[in-house]
Amino acid sequence: MKLYYSPGACALASHIVAREVGIAIEFEKVDISSKRMQDEIDFLAIK
């Protein structure tokens, strides 16, 4: 599972729950203002 998050948003709750129940999870940071991920891919283009 992949979790897209923005620092300061409420994604921390999902992160905590996933860790507690042992779900393998990947994290992808998203810059909300530019709509880009860390690797400069357009976040809105994800399907």
Image: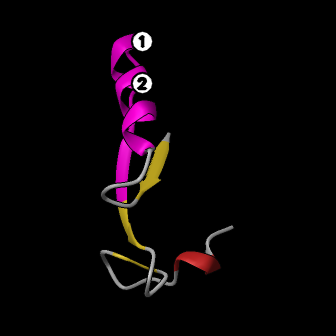
Q: What residue type is labelled 2?
A: Ala
Q: Mark 1 points at which residue?
A: 21
Residue 9, position as x, y percentages in the image? 41, 53
What is the span of residues highlighted in magenta in the rendered image?
11-28
Above or below, 34 relative to 16:
below
Q: How far apart are marks 1 and 2 (CA)?
A: 5 Å
Q: Looking at the image, which residue sits at the far top?
A: 21
How many discs appear? 2
Q: Which amino acid does label 1 sit on?
A: Val
Q: Do the residues labelled 1 and 2 touch (CB within 8 Å)?
A: yes
12 part of magenta stretch: yes
Q: Residue at x 38, y 61 (%)?
A: 6
Looking at the rendered image, the quarter that the C terminus falls into is bottom right
Per the image, label 2 sits on a secondary structure element best described as helix
Q: From the top left corner, tell me how far across and down residue 25 is, in percent.
A: 39, 36
- Location of residue 24 by image quarter: top left
Does the magenta portion include 23?
A: yes
Find disc 2 in the rendering and name its residue: 18
Q: How crowded is mark 2: few (under 14 residues within 10 Å), some or many (20 or more)?
A: some
Determine crowd level at label 1: few under 14, some 14-19, many 20+ residues with C-alpha closer than 10 A: few
- Residue at 63% x, 80% y: name it: 45
**Dot 1: what SS?**
helix
User: Looking at the image, what colour scheme do you see?
Assistant: secondary structure
Rendered residue at 32%/55% (across/down): 8
Name the outermost residue toward the right: 47
**For residue 11, above or below residue 13:** below
